[in-house]
Image: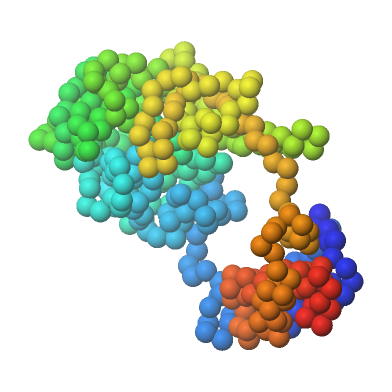
Amino acid sequence: MIRSNLNPSLLILIFSLALCSGMLLSAQVSVGDGSYTTIFPGTDSAGRNGFPSGTPQLSGNALGKPVPTNDWWSKLIKEDHADNLFNYPMTLKTTNQGLIVTYIPWGPIGDSAPIEIGLTGLNAARTSVSDYSDWTVTMNWSDGSHDLKTTSGIGMPFLYFQKDADDVVEIKVNSGTVTVSGEMLIIANAVNGADFVFYAPSGSSWSSIGSTYTSTLNGNDYWSMAMLPQSTTNVNAVAVEYKKYAFVFPTNTTTTWSYNEISSKVTSVFSVSTEVKEGTDTNVLLGLLPHQWSNLAPTSPTPNEYSYDAIRGELKTMDGNTFTLENTFKGILPTLPNLTQYSTGFSLTDLDAKISQIENDGLATWTDSYNEGQVMNRLIQTARIADQIGDIVARA
């Protein structure tokens, strides 16, 4: 619920500003002390703020769901193919033939394409989003004859793949040293010192023609891929160690919050639901970013597995499907109070001079919600300050 502590005179000012900007329209729906309109307010004089062009490129479970437009993978819903998809630690790019996977310590992906993952004959004009949850997304390539899905999550060193039963997996290795060890396809030093491993189901085999490796997955429709920690010295040993996570596929990720007003503690619980494709292991390998592992709740599991170097800092991994954060939040003052005794440099004259510079400002004639919101906020906050120091003329 939105509440206001402003005095009546200031509320009249805000109401007048809102009327002038055209923000209050006839078709209003009240929510608590606020409201929203169900009528499109129209574009501005420059033709901006129209409806987004095109239709979100969704499929499968994502159809009918709200579309996030500010996530690390949101480019996928607008463009046929997307690059610079950073899930930490990997960097991804979609093409007609499938997914490019690389490791970029810093900067855009560019032409880097050490590993290309697809299906024999796949040629999809676009990659759609077929599902997503709080920190995972499932990408889908479908050309009518072949179907490929890849699930990736923030901080997850694994990628999880599925295909149609009769499709053949095709891996193009453009750099690195390849070793086939049973069902594992190991690519050492693929790019920037990074090592990668593909895990095919039990009983699978890999065939190769040149640098292209294929597998029917022993009749199965799933496989996975992992990036090994940059500190890995014995690639084969760590690849074997990681195999226990290879067939535990995430099906949903959720983040829930609670706030204790007495202790001022915000508790955030991160949880993963899984489907075990084969084997007895049930945990995924989760990666925690610095703002997460440095704020773990006392009762939370802790990351004690390998670490990765990521552009956001050290990515620490843990064997488990949940962890809990705890942060202290005591609120934010919307305006500093008029208490001159706490600031030796405070000058009421200087403050009054600054207020006078904008006291007659108005809003522009266009309706750019971002820029107009900043202008309106400046007027509202300055009116509040003027009210506090008794400058009634400027406030009005």
Residue appearing at x 32%, y 31% in the figure: 227
Q: Is residue 25 in view?
A: no
Residue 328 image position (x, y, % from top left): 68, 37
Residue 126 image position (x, y, % from top left): 36, 55
Residue 297 image position (x, y, % from top left): 63, 26
Q: Image check: 238 left or right of 191?
A: right
Residue appearing at x 37%, y 58% in the figure: 80
Q: Which quadrant would the C terminus be assigned to in this image?
A: bottom right
Which residue occupies the foreground of this view, 374 or 222?
A: 374
User: Vertical placement of 72 versus 243: above or below?
Assistant: below
Which corner quadrant of the image does residue 252 belong to?
Answer: top right
Q: Image check: 363 left or right of 13?
A: left
Which corner quadrant of the image does residue 373 belong to?
Answer: bottom right
Which corner quadrant of the image does residue 330 belong to?
Answer: top right
Which residue occupies the foreground of this view, 168 or 13?
A: 13
Q: Which quadrant would the N terminus be assigned to in this image?
A: bottom right
User: Vertical placement of 307 versus 212: above or below?
Assistant: above
Residue appearing at x 25%, y 53% in the figure: 110
Q: Is residue 179 in view?
A: yes
Q: Furthest residue to the front?
A: 344
User: Vertical placement of 43 versus 193: above or below?
Assistant: below
Residue appearing at x 81%, y 34% in the figure: 262
Residue 181 image position (x, y, % from top left): 21, 18
Which residue occupies the foreground of this view, 318 or 344?
A: 344
Which residue occupies the foreground of this view, 256 or 164?
A: 256
Q: Image check: 251 left or right of 82?
A: right
Q: Furthest residue to the right?
A: 8
